[in-house]
Amino acid sequence: MWVNDPQDDFLVRCREAIYQFEAADKAEDTEGRFYWMNRLADLCNESGIELMEIEAAWRDRPKDSKL
């Protein structure tokens, strides 16, 4: 499964977008949330992976995972 390769450039960009989105969400930064959600949508369009797959992989990752 694609989520198991932490060196994959796509995963690095996804991970960054997710972390930034979560930070914006925590800070209640509406503009930041919007920007990073759009960035995730761009990554999905680029890869053909649906956002729901990224969300599921993120939610289901081992809790000690750095992804």
Image (spheres, rainbow, N blue to C red):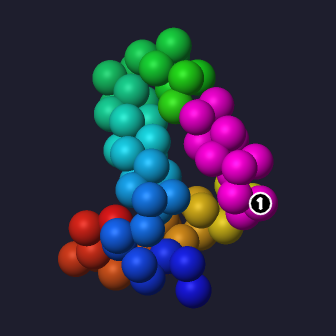
Quadrant where the N terminus is found in the figure: bottom right
Observer-nearest residue: 11 or 56? 11
For the stretch drawn in magenta, what is the main secondary structure? helix
Residue at 58% in and 23% down: 34
Q: Report if residue 48 lies within the magenta region.
A: yes
9 displayed left or right of 65: right
- Which of the 4 quarters of the picture holds residue 49? bottom right
Q: How many labels does the image show?
A: 1
Residue at 42% in and 17% down: 29
Observer-nearest residue: 5 or 66? 5
Residue at 42% in and 30% down: 25
Observer-nearest residue: 12 or 40? 12
Q: Looking at the picture, which amino acid does disc 1 mark?
A: Gly
Q: Position of residue 30 (x, y in %)?
A: 51, 16
Q: Position of residue 42 (x, y in %)?
A: 67, 39
Mark 1 burial class by Cα count in 10 Å: few <14, some 14-19, many 20+: few
Q: Position of residue 58 (x, y in %)?
A: 48, 65
24 displayed left or right of 39: left
Height in image: 11 above or below 7? above
User: Looking at the image, can residue 22 be seen?
Assistant: no
Q: Give the range drawn in magenta.
A: 37-49
Height in image: 56 above or below 41? below
Height in image: 29 above or below 19? above
Which structural element holds mark 1?
loop
Residue at 32% in and 23% down: 27
Q: Where is residue 33 in the image (x, y as percent from the top left)?
A: 51, 26
